[in-house]
């Protein structure tokens, strides 16, 4: 790791002395491949062994302590070199710029050529102090490469770099959801929506069933024709008591002739074929004879005879 020696040059000290009430402006940065004795650094007015101009990509600070971000790329470097010095140039208002600060490394950075390492980029952070100026500005190179170091972390109020995440239960405001996380959340919401829709359908069906039952009950209750009223019962009970009585003993009557559980008694003479007369007796058998039969001598007594019509 290189150890850097940094000084405010004699010309730079003159800028600070004259900066009261004026705008202090950083104009550019340069790098060189040469070195000088550390005791001679303050007197330098240019970098030793100039190689390339660096871009100023950002400036920030607090209480006159400033931080400059510099960027070196090898786009125009045809031959690699060892970077020993970095110089910061500045001016007051519109006056002539001077070498304000010079930084020298004990161990150089090796800068490759564009052919050897295309798109090589290296960032440097330089801290400096500027007192008395009314404002401090810098010429920012908007065409410089954007590097990770140049991008700040994003927040709800600041644009910047953000980390992706596939979790669906985080409350972080510094992470960004991936499509996978969005899909999981969507599927969960869709499932809940389906359940809600099914529940609503079930509830609607139940309500319709309940409404139908209530309507049927109301119609049934309002129909006085199909119900036995107290008046009906009173009328029927008085009817039964007034019209007949039950002794508990069965008395055969003429209407009981065909009852199988009662001995059948004929109370009047039956005429068989119009030629034979039977006294009132019990009927033991029934026969059906062919049409035109007139001879019943073969039929047992106490038999009821039917002759088919011709």
Image (cartoon, grey):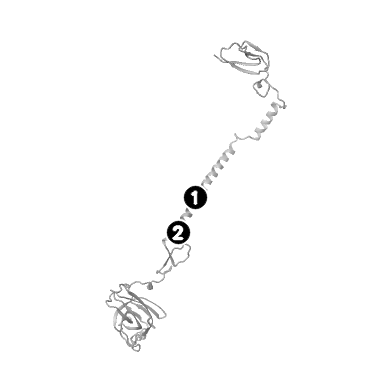
Residue 271 quadrant: top right
Mark 1 secondary-structure assignment: helix
* Mark 2 neighbour density, 10 Å: few (under 14) some (14–19) many (20 or more): some
Residue drawn at (69%, 30%), measured in percent from left and top?
238
Give whichever of 16, 67 is nearer the camera.
67
**Taking 300 as reference, is 22 left or right?**
left
Q: Position of residue 224 (x, y in %)?
A: 60, 35
Q: Which residue is mark 1?
A: 198
Residue lying at the far left of the rendered structure: 78
Position of residue 271 relative to residue 207, above or below, is above
Q: Position of residue 253 (x, y in %)?
A: 68, 21
Residue lying at the far bottom of the rendered structure: 39
Residue drawn at (51%, 48%), measured in percent from left and top?
202
Label 1 – label 2 distance at C-alpha = 21 Å
| Residue 187 visible in the snapshot | yes
Residue drawn at (31%, 80%), measured in percent from left and top?
82
**Taking 300 as reference, is 137 left or right?**
left
Q: Which mark is residue 184?
A: 2
* Mark 1 neighbour density, 10 Å: few (under 14) some (14–19) many (20 or more): few
């Amino acid at each position: 790791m290189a150890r850097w020696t940094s000084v405010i040059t004699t010309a730079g000290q003159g800028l600070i002395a004259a900066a009261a009430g004026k705008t202090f402006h950083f104009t550019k940065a340069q790098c060189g491949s040469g070195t000088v004795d550390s005791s001679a650094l303050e007197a330098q007015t240019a970098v030793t062994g100039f190689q390339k101009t660096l871009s100023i990509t950002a400036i920030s600070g607090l209480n006159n302590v400033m931080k400059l971000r510099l960027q070196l790329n090898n786009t125009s470097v045809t031959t690699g070199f060892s970077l020993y010095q970095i110089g910061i140039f500045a001016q007051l208002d519109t006056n002539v710029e001077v070498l304000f600060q010079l930084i020298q490394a004990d161990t150089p950075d090796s800068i490759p050529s564009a052919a050897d390492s295309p798109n090589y980029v290296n960032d440097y952070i330089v801290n400096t102090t500027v007192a008395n100026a009314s404002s401090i500005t810098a010429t920012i190179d908007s065409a410089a490469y954007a590097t990770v170091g140049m991008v700040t972390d994003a927040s709800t109020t600041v644009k910047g770099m953000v980390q992706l995440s596939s979790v669906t239960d985080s409350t972080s405001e510094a992470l960004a959801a991936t499509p996978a996380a969005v899909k999981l959340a969507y599927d969960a919401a869709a499932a809940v929506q389906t359940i809600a829709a099914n529940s609503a359908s079930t509830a609607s069906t139940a309500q319709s069933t309940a409404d139908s039952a209530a309507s049927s009950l109301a119609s049934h209750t309002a129909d006085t024709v199909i119900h036995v009223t107290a008046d009906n019962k009173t009328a029927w009970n008085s009817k039964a008591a007034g019209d007949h009585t039950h002794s508990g003993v069965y008395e055969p009557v003429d209407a009981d002739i065909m009852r199988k559980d009662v001995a059948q008694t004929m109370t009047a003479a039956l005429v068989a074929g119009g030629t034979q007369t039977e006294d009132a007796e019990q009927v033991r058998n029934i026969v059906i004879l062919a049409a035109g039969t007139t001879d019943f001598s073969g039929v047992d007594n106490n038999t009821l005879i039917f002759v088919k019509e011709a």
